[in-house]
Amino acid sequence: MYFFRIIIFSLFFFNTYLNYAQMIKLDGVLVRETKLGSQEYEIINKNDTLKLDLSLKNKLSHSIVSWYGDKMFIAKQGVLNERGAQVETRAVKLDLKGKVIDTLYEPSISEGEYIESLRISMNNKYLLVVTRNYKNGDSDYVIWNSPITLKIIDLQTTKIIYIRNNLAMSLSFELSHSPFSFDENYLVYSIKNMGNNIEIAGAAKPTPIIKEKGIYLVDVKKGQEKFITNGSDANFAPNRNDFSFVYEDKIFLYSLSLLNQNILYKIAGVYEMRWYPNGNYLYVQSQKRILFSRGMKFNEILIDVDKKEETSFTKYHFAYTPYFWKSLTSNPQGCNGK
């Protein structure tokens, strides 16, 4: 009996060792916010960790939205007015110490233009700026749900190459972490609610914009857009013109070249999804309600895209906090930039 127990325990520990040995370690430089809304970040790689405090200083705040090359970030800079509202914004480049290097886009303050979100294309060619108006006529009352405008800026020429006004109301519009395609010719966005009535300034009466709920594709060069499929949270892969999206508790993969979609994985409660930079894995955060409780259980999984199955990995436990991998093609170096 004792001999059999030794064998069972030996097999258990051997199996545990094999699982650990096969566990995928997601190497690569990563920046993440240490606490949601804190604007305190840390840059992590296998060699060191660098703290980066971008919290409010002299009425200025900075929120990182992505890496820009090897040693810079794209961030949204906000300025607080006398009432404590952040109505003055601009798109800036930051170095690894949080210092502003350059201003990429500055909205028209006189027209009440406010940057809602920023995204950069795979190879840093384009900057997508989503803006809306925060003003209500001559009043300085801040409007939090107003018509949005899409602008795509060529970062080499700094010219706006695409603009779409009054696309939807800001609360019904959704933009994922990686909306630009691998070849940078397309971008995707989602509409969460159908049938918005948008009141355009100066119009005699409200102008209705009826937009079907789902995912839309924009051809950057042609300036055209079309409805693609039902779903939300559309993220382009970093190595091909495929994007993942969520619909009815399933993760799908849509191919632009084949114009079809396939179920990748079944999972409920997805609220965050990011491609790992090599394009082989999809990192997913989800949550579900704890039985007989008001609490929510956080979960993170790594999906092997080719095998369409979950795989073991060293977990991050980044619950509800933004995080951004640096592209593996950018030859990552130490956090100190040396």
Image (cartoon, grey):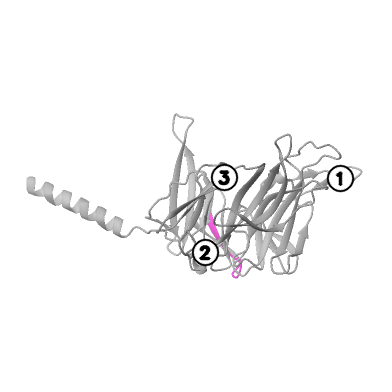
Relative to 40, is 11 above or below?
A: below
Give the mark nearer the N terminus: 1 vs 3: 3
Which of pointers 2 and 1 lies earlier in the amino acid sequence? 1
How far apart are the two marked residues, 2 and 3, measured between alpha carbons?
22 Å
Q: Which mark is residue 184?
A: none
Residue 212: horizontal and vertical position, in percent? 71, 51
Residue under circle 3?
A: 39
Amino acid type, mark 2? Ser
Q: Is residue 256 magenta?
A: yes
Q: Residue 299 is drawn in which quadrant?
A: top left
66 lies above or below 271: below
Which numbered tag is attached to residue 327?
2
Where disc 2 sits, the SS reads loop
Please provide percent x and percent y for residue 287: 48, 42
Gap in angstroms between the C-alphas marked 2 and 1? 42 Å
Q: Eyeballing the image, is 317 above or below 333?
A: above
User: Residue at (57%, 45%) from the top-left corner?
Assistant: 39
Q: Specify whether residue 201 is in view.
A: yes
> Which-is-in-front pick, marks 1 and 3?
3
Quarter-of-image position of residue 145: top right
Q: Quick check: marks 2 and 1 in contact, CB under 8 Å?
A: no
Q: CA distance from mark 1 to mark 3?
A: 34 Å
The residue type indicated by label 1 comes to Ala
Indicate which label's residue lies in the foreground, 2 or 3: 3
Q: Which residue is mark 1?
A: 201
